[in-house]
Amino acid sequence: MKCRRHFFMARRRKMDPERKAFINSLLEHYQPKDAQDIQDMLKDLLGETLQGMLEAEMDDHLGYSKYDYKNKETDDSRNGYSPKTVTSSMGTIDLDIPRDRKGDFEPQIVKKNQTDISNIEDQVLSMYAKGMTTRDISAHLKDVYGVDASAEMISHMTDRILPIAKEWQNRPLERKYAIVFMDAVHFHVREDNRTVKKAVYVAIGVKLNGKREVLGMWVGGNESAKYWLSVLNEIKNRGVEDIMIVSVDGLTGFGDAIHAVFPQVEIQRCIVHQIRYSTKFISYKDLKPFIADLKLVYKADTEDLALTALEDLEEKWGKKYPASIGFWRNNWTQLSTYFKYPSEIRKLIYTTNSIENFNRQLRKVTKSKTIFPTDDALFKMLYLAMMDATKKMDRKGLGLGSDTGSVMHLFWGSDPARGYRLSTDSIAYQG
């Protein structure tokens, strides 16, 4: 029992005599009364330490210490100081940056133009990516760190991400993708002193190894097939040679735009969107039995069974709801693509849920801003939100297998000719 009591006793921090004497001298000098006083003490010590290191860097640069003229072997010399205020995790610190007469001194501990010596800037970007406004971030930094950072300063910090975001948007892409999902999400932006609704065109690709990546986000006008055509051309110009399947909603002319750039791609229209379109004409009392019969169409095991179920649906409901049946008949080629593939692929491509879930995360992050001042302000927030969202995307995966061969087999095992065309160099090219 004695051993058990000893086992559960709180562990004491061990301190060597030199460190203990040092801390005692600090406590005697600063005489802190509470935790805030200790924070102020540490902030003061950080400032003194930085100042001492800057002086040491200048000694090393000149080759002699201050007033040690006997060892001076250079025609350069000290030339006073420049005041500088830096932001730390403990608050702002005032420093005196040493200067030399030739202007060659490049301090390393606090570099030229560096005003942040903490990870606060990273935290600002993280908070911005999660949808906090610049004013909320400013208030948070003041409350938690005692740092005075205006909303304008926060905005300037986040502006530094724009060149990186633009570089990402123009990066080279994979040569081949198994699937590409395309959809648009809408936001309000100020333009020419008025508020306009703009579409952000989003494309997410599934690589041959089963990994997903956001190919790009394009801020444009109202969603149109014409703008999608320019997006597809840009995707091709960034190195994409072939796509197996493109999963899209029912936007008019979308299929023609896709085939104009990638003639051999197969298009799968979203079944969920199709169900919504075709049931909005159905009266409430007929809705439940109609959906039960419609389910036999899109849940069929084969395309032949689906066509038989569609004929039965038309025979039963065609006279009463011809437009609803016509939606399926007229678009059957693009609605039935998924019947060619095994269940793992069917579940993935018959709906645009993958990209809609991503778009939902973008909306969640941007809900605090109802109107964006510029396209760049919108793109900046979407890029940071995308970086945050893709971490979760990478963790979840798609369940298609971890290697290129398994994904290719799922797609092209049932289509040898297409599979050969895509896979002649895909086996060597792992992406």
Image: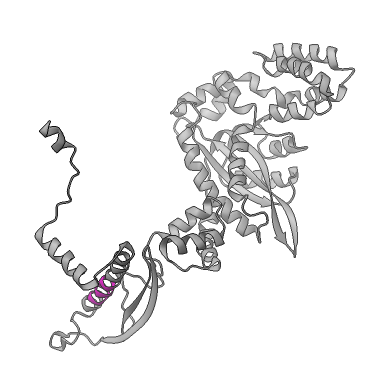
Q: Nearer the viewer, residue 229 or 428?
A: 229
Q: Position of residue 280 (x, y in %)?
A: 81, 29
Q: Is residue 431 visible?
A: no
Q: Is residue 300 visible?
A: yes
Q: How is the image coloured?
A: one colour
Q: Nearer the viewer, residue 370 or 41?
A: 41
Q: In percent of the image, x 49 and y 56: which residue is there?
A: 125
Residue lying furthest right:
319
Report which quarter residue 96 is drawn in.
Answer: bottom left
Q: Position of residue 17 (x, y in %)?
A: 9, 60
Q: How many marks?
A: 0
Q: Position of residue 292 (x, y in %)?
A: 74, 16
Q: Which quarter of the rendered picture does the N terminus lie within?
A: top left
Report which quarter residue 44 is drawn in.
Answer: bottom left
Check the image and report above or below for 304 versus 78. above
Q: Nearer the viewer, residue 355 or 147?
A: 147
Q: Nearer the viewer, residue 417 or 243?
A: 243
Q: Position of residue 381 (x, y in %)?
A: 57, 54
Horizontally, is 1 left or right of 340 in the view?
Answer: left
Q: Main secondary structure of the magenta part?
A: helix
Check residue 295 for magenta coloring: no
Horizontally, is 52 left or right of 416 in the view?
Answer: left
Horizontally, is 78 left or right of 287 in the view?
Answer: left
Q: Specify the segment rendered in magenta.
A: 48-56
Q: In percent of the image, x 53 and y 50: which residue is there?
A: 130
Report which quarter residue 287 is drawn in.
Answer: top right
Check the image and report above or below for 310 versus 431. above
Q: In percent of the image, x 87 and y 22: which residue is there?
A: 322
